[in-house]
Amino acid sequence: MQKYGVMDASYQAAGGEQGIKKLVDEFYNQMETLKQGKHIRAMHTDDLGVIKDKLSVFLMGWLGGPRNYAKKYGQMSIPMVHKHLVIGEEERDAWLFCMQEALKYQDYDEELKQYLIRELARPAEAIRRVSQMEHG
């Protein structure tokens, strides 16, 4: 059993920088093509270049790789960055669904895929809670 979440094990298992960029590209592809993703895709600008880079750089550090987000984009709190958006259970679940679908296209161990969805559900729920306090 792999020990994800320890040092850079998750980052390495995800294929490092290139693997994470591939995941992020597929995630936004799923968001654009899946019926369940249309609503959350509409929350983004037409040009996804910067947002893809932000998610990639964030995930790299979050998975134990280089922590360059603050250097590149400044300090941030995941829930606070999204507080201007109305995020309910439907939006949270759609985001996680698109990520789960994107993971199907990655050459990751099934255990890593399950770990990522389980761990990404935490910040997704935190974003929903902050949004509900702001807009609820």
Image (cartoon, grey):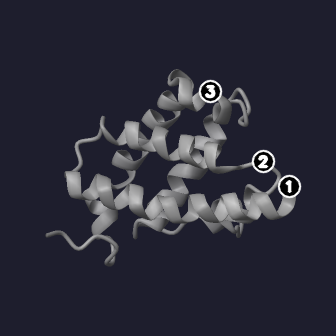
CA distance separating discs 3 and 1 = 21 Å
Compared with 71, 38 (above or below) is above
Name the foreground residue: 12 vs 44.
44
- Say whether marks 1 and 2 touch (CB < 8 Å): yes
Q: Is residue 134 left or right of residue 55?
A: right
What residue is shown at x 49% (from left), y 28% (from top)?
Answer: 29
Q: Quadrant of the C terminus?
A: bottom right
Compared with 67, 25 (above or below) is above
What residue is shown at x 48% (from left), y 59% (from top)?
Answer: 120
What residue is shown at x 68% (from left), y 58% (from top)?
Answer: 128
- Say whether marks 2 and 3 touch (CB < 8 Å): no
Q: Position of residue 101 (x, y in %)?
A: 39, 36
Which amino acid type is shown beneath numbered disc 3?
Lys
Q: Is residue 10 visible?
A: yes
Question: On the image, numbered disc 3 is attached to which residue?
Answer: 38
Which label belongs to residue 135?
A: 1
Question: On the image, numbered disc 2 is attached to which residue?
Answer: 86
Q: Quadrant of the N terminus?
A: bottom left
